[in-house]
Image (cartoon, rainbow, N blue to C red):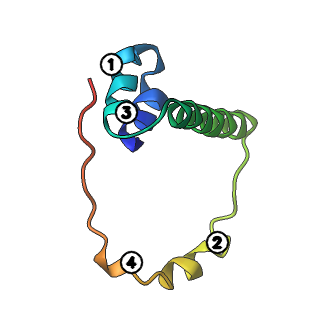
């Protein structure tokens, strides 16, 4: 799902039925796919509006303290995304 969202963000004109079929094969329903597309598109829209208007968020918004409290933060291993074609 995250790879699809990334692909939709970076190359929206290349999304095909095969991508949707891949999501279905992974257990996502048609309603889930619609939600994934809507949420990804809305997020991208909001980011572009903020960037276009020059909105800058303050660097310390309190999230740093919260992330230090996550019980699993030391167990996180970054994994590369696969390639969706």
Query: Reading the chain from its start, which is encountered first: label 3 or label 2?
Result: 3
Q: Residue at 24% of width from left, 49% of height from top?
A: 80
Query: Reading the chain from its start, which is encountered first: label 1 or label 4?
Result: 1
Label 4 or label 3, whichever lies nearer to me, is 3
Q: CA distance from mark 4 to mark 2?
A: 19 Å
Check whether the beta carbons of the residues at disc 4 and disc 2 lie within 8 A of each other. no
Label 4 or label 2, whichever lies nearer to me, is 4
- Image spot of residue 47 (x, y percent): 64, 40
- Mark 2 secondary-structure assignment: loop
Label 1 or label 4, whichever lies nearer to me, is 1
Query: Reading the chain from its start, which is encountered first: label 4 or label 2?
Result: 2
Residue under numbered circle 1: 18
Q: Is residue 60 above or below residue 24?
A: below
Query: Reading the chain from its start, which is encountered first: label 4 or label 3?
Result: 3
Front-most of residues 14 and 68: 14
- Mark 3 secondary-structure assignment: helix
Residue under numbered circle 2: 60
Q: Residues within 10 Å of mark 2 (few under 14, many from 20)?
A: few
Is 72 on the left-hand or right-hand side of 44?
A: left
- Image spot of residue 53 (x, y percent): 75, 36
Q: What label does residue 73 carry, if any?
A: 4
Q: What label does residue 34 carry, if any?
A: none
Q: Is residue 37 above or below residue 61?
A: above
- Image spot of residue 43 (x, y percent): 62, 40
- Mark 1 secondary-structure assignment: helix
Quarter holding the C terminus is top left
Residue under numbered circle 3: 23
Quarter holding the N terminus is top left
Q: Is residue 28 above or below residue 74?
A: above
């Amino acid at each position: 799902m995250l790879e699809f969202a990334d692909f939709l963000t970076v190359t929206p004109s290349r999304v095909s039925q095969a991508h949707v079929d891949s999501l279905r094969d992974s257990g996502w329903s048609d309603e889930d796919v619609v939600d994934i597309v809507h949420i990804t598109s809305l997020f991208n829209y909001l980011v572009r509006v903020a960037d276009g208007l020059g909105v800058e968020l303050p660097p310390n918004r309190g999230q740093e303290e919260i992330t230090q409290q996550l019980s699993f933060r030391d167990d996180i291993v970054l994994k590369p995304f696969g390639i969706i074609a």
